Image (cartoon, rainbow, N blue to C red):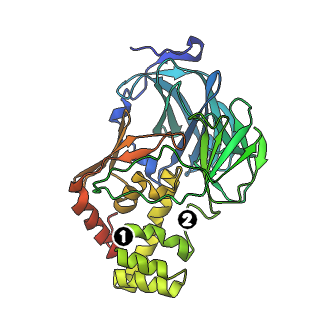
Amino acid sequence: MKRLYLFSFLLILSKLAAGQSIAANNFNYWYNPSNDVDLQIRPVRTANNIMVRYTLITRQGNPGKYSISWEARNSYVDREGIAIRERDSVLSVNGNMKRGFLVLPVPEKPWLLVGKVTNDNGKSWIYFKQIESIYPVDGWIETSDGVITENHLSKNKEYIARSANGKPLIVSYYNTVFPPALPPFAEKEGHNERFFFHDSLFRVESGQKFLPKKEGLYLFQEDTSAARGFSYRVVKENFPKFSKVDELIPPLVLVTTPEEFNELNNSKGEKAKFDKVILSITGDKDRARIFMKNFFHNIELANIFFSSYKEGWKTDRGIVFQIFGLPDEVSKNGGNEVWNYKALNTRFTFVKSGSVYDPENYVLLRDKRLTDIWFGSVDLWRKGRFRE
């Protein structure tokens, strides 16, 4: 068995009960809103260690009925791991959430932190995050309930910003309206923006309260010349849902013609004009209701699962999830994430391409051969006969 270069007092050797590699797992439950649990893991690089904050969200009962065991693995193909002993500190249990943290040494080489969530009936789910010495995140946002492990904050709500080393933070604010990702067949590859020009700057002390009043992207840094920091997108209070007419229009670019989309924009928030365009697309009132209900249900889920420096529905994984729904299989190996849709006999490959704005961003490998599959599914949406 390979040994990890971690401090020996942290770890004890043990085999995984399942004896299965990460690469052999199907992780589609990560994006299934009906799954019993979700485990959000957010590493932070400090001067002397890696601080891992986590939030366990349970959808089926008390979080106390679920346990988390932590392991370290060298790679995605290792069938055995090293159990991390007595380093999981629970900070709070509130409603359906359990929050806690682990303190890990800075590694000499990257490895995988694996969290195994098990309920009192013995059913378990695997979550993981790569731990590496060169990691750009060096702080976090918290409230009285604990650290925010999601990537978005609500406008007009009070938060506390903390740097890992207690230093003051310079906050870059970006009022950029980021465009949605290109379709999977586009000749031009999607890309992850590496640098944006900020609209304004302000300073907060570590531990100081701040109240974001504007929607947009906020990047917190100790040093603005370094590619280190942490970012959150500030969104409306009703996010991830959209309800107002002007909020409903932008996502419809995925399933409308340019002419139809221009008509929607020209409705200028008037519901009657908006409804008229939707009816012309679907051709029937019942299909229009089905279309709107299910289309924006998927938009909400994409916002929950994939939001980063821009809204989740605008990301590469977000647009694929929106049009094709939950994949039958999700596999992860190295820097790739592959989604398999059995009924379509189609796979989508996403490659990790992170930046200081989002270290976990994934970019889709586009292919012209996906044109017919994309428009075929869009046509089903327009007819109210989307694929489940």
Could you tell me which quadrant the C terminus lies in? bottom left
- Is residue 78 visible in this depiction of the protein? yes
The total number of labels drawn is 2
Residue 241, numbered label: 2
Q: Which quarter of the rendering shows the N terminus?
A: top left
- Above or below, comparing residue 225 to residue 59 in the picture: above
Relative to 189, is 236 on the left or the right? Answer: right
Residue marked by disc 1: 255
- Please indicate whether residue 153 sits to the left or right of residue 177 in the image: right
Which residue type does callout 2 highlight?
A: Lys
Question: Cα distance, mark 1 to mark 2?
Answer: 19 Å
Residues marked 1 and 2 touching at CB (< 8 Å): no
Find residue 89 and report its image quarter: top right
Name the residue nearer the viewer: 159 or 301: 159
Among the 4 quarters of the image, the one containing residue 39: top right
Query: SS class of the residue under badge 1?
Result: loop
